[in-house]
Amino acid sequence: MPAAKQEDDMEAVKVAEGLYWVGAIDWDVRYFHGRSYTTDLGTTYNAYLIVDDKLTLVDTVEGPFFDEMLARIKSVADPSRIEYMIANHAELDHAGALPRIMDVVPQATFVCSELGKPAFQATFHRDWNFHTIKEGETLSLGKRTLQFFPTPMLHWPDSMVTYLAEQKILLPNDAFGQHLASSERFDDEVPMDVIMGQATKYYANILLPLSNIVQRALTKLSGLKIELIGPSHGIIWRSQPGHIVDAYARWARGETRTKAVVIYDTMWDSTRKMAHAIVEGIGLEGVDAKLHNLSSTHRSDVMTDVLDARALVFGSPTLNNTMFPTLGDFLYYLGGLKPRAQVAAAFGSFGWGGGAVKAMRKEIEAMGLPLLDEGLEVRYVPDEEALARCVAYGRQIASRVK
Ligand code: FEO
């Protein structure tokens, strides 16, 4: 007798009357978007099954998790009865299992946005029974009505959200999500600081450059009564949906606090000494200071701190007449995320020609952050007087953001 598959025991989780979570938990994944983003706590791919006169699946999971999703669907309904496949987004973490579920139900109506259809076609090269939705279009499933709203660029041009009108439930795909694997599914079952830590990291690394678009989407969705939010990653917001909506509104507005983040790397400890002295100076002014050595903190975790920081301070030793490679990597990544700090500064150590501070200034200017000044440089190893200058520099930075 063949051994039972591990997935056979996996069940759907009831989210609301007739709505089930049928997603997958990826406990092991440690990176997202290549290696640009660390998912230290894993993630989930949330798919939702609506049991109504028309059996409906909203989104799927990454391709390798198809069997897990199918087992969860089978625990409440026969998958071959699916009549509508609602695909909110074409990225493979949600769409990867589409070809296999569509092989089960090739006759199903495939519902997506107008920009979604070419994205799904170019990704899967399949001729499914596409139905593209218009802004606000509705679809009756029997007792329930789905309403669709395109949300282009949240997170891709094809993205849309699905709203269960009678139950006031929003299934917004990537928006309001977090990369967080857990055996619990709901916001009242996991400590809020754990959820928000991952929600903040998600926004800082994925949605930050799209903040104007987030604001427009929030305005568009503000007309809907929302009692539950089921994102496509992480925890489902059933107790405090307003908590994450309010946080998105703050982040999208670019709200910052009196906080400075010092981001540096070091070669022979000189820049490290400078960084610590600068942090000391910032703290002496009563401003929250965070310190990250890029050799020990991943760029995506630094970004979580950058999101609400008012000052960004970059430190690098000079190597080959320019900045350290880790600073080059971080500034390149940061530029794409369009940070909105009020002031930036650069510092570093050098032995003879220098060049790191100048190179960092160039990158900072290119991303449009206001520079405090020309920067602070120390030759070889900082002595007491140089460290005192670093403390004073920290005070000066802090005074600009109080
Ligand atoms: Fe979770 Fe844009 O995919």
Image (cartoon, helix red, strand yellow):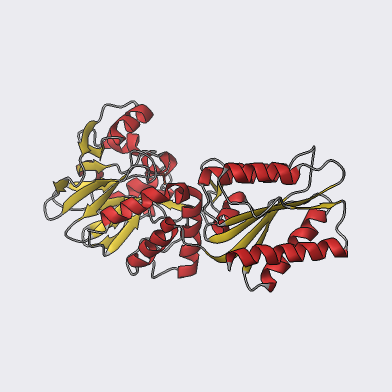
From the viewer's side, name the closer residue of 398 and 292.
Answer: 398
Regarding residue 235, the answer to whether it shows in the image is no
Q: Residue furthest left?
A: 142
Quadrant of the drawing holding the C terminus: bottom right
Q: Is residue 162 left or right of residue 382?
A: left
Q: Quadrant of ligand 1?
A: top left
Q: Residue 333 in the image: x percent, y percent?
A: 58, 44
Q: Count of labels shown? A: 0
Q: Is residue 10 left or right of residue 277?
A: left
Q: Residue furthest front?
A: 373
From the viewer's side, name the closer residue of 307 and 397.
Answer: 397
Which residue is depicted at the point 62% across and 46% down? 364
Q: Is residue 326 left or right of residue 184?
A: right
From the viewer's side, name the closer residue of 163 and 389.
Answer: 389
From the viewer's side, name the closer residue of 252 and 86.
Answer: 252
Q: Is residue 124 above or below residue 283?
A: above
Which residue is depicted at the point 37% across and 48% down? 213
User: Residue 76 is drawn in which quadrant?
Assistant: bottom left
Q: Residue 77 in the image: x percent, y percent?
A: 23, 50
Regarding residue 362, the answer to whether it shows in the image is yes
Quadrant of the drawing holding the N terminus: top left
Which residue is depicted at the point 26% across and 65% down? 227
Q: Residue 380 in the image: x percent, y percent?
A: 87, 51
Q: Residue 129 in the image: x percent, y percent?
A: 21, 31
